[in-house]
Image (tube, rainbow, N blue to C red):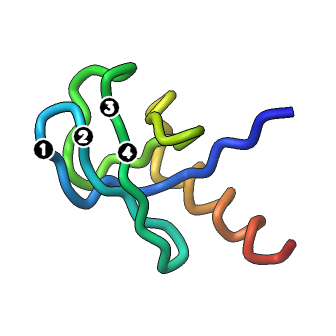
Amino acid sequence: MCLAIPMKVIEIDGNNGVVESMGLKRKVNFTLLKNVKLGDYILLHAGFAIAKIKPDEAKKTIELAKDI
């Protein structure tokens, strides 16, 4: 089973950056995605951004995770 966490992009430096969710910040590699911008929401898995998601979907998932 895989778990990907929705996170907001807060820093970009080439193919690397920093993402944030629920007060946690993580380093991320953007190599698997194109056109990532500050403020985008991505799914983070094993240090890699694996998909972009819509902000409303990210926020719903984050709220569900808080309830767990």
Q: CA distance from mark 4 to mark 3?
A: 6 Å
User: Which residue type carries mark 3?
Assistant: Phe
Residue 13: image location, x then y, percent: 12, 44
Q: CA distance from mark 4 to mark 1?
A: 10 Å
Q: Are marks 1 and 2 in contact (CB under 8 Å)?
A: yes
| Residue identified by numbered label 2 | 16
At horizontal 37% and vertical 45% (from top left) the residue drawn is 28
Mark earlier in primary sequence (4, 2): 2
**In this orientation, which residue lies closer to the viewer: 55 or 28?**
28
Q: Are marks 4 and 2 in contact (CB under 8 Å)?
A: yes
User: Which residue type carries mark 2?
Assistant: Asn
Q: Secondary structure at mark 1?
A: strand
User: Which residue type carries mark 4?
Assistant: Val
Q: Are marks 2 and 3 in contact (CB under 8 Å)?
A: yes
Residue 30: image location, x then y, percent: 32, 31
At horizontal 42% and vertical 59% (from top left) the residue drawn is 26
| Residue identified by numbered label 3 | 30
- Badge 4: how crowded within 10 Å, few (<14), some, or many (20+)? many
Quarter of the image with the N terminus is top right
Quarter of the image with the C terminus is bottom right
Q: Secondary structure at mark 4?
A: strand
**In this orientation, which residue lies closer to the viewer: 19 or 8?**
19
Q: CA distance from mark 4 to mark 2?
A: 6 Å
- Badge 2: how crowded within 10 Å, few (<14), some, or many (20+)? some
| Residue identified by numbered label 1 | 13
| Residue identified by numbered label 4 | 28
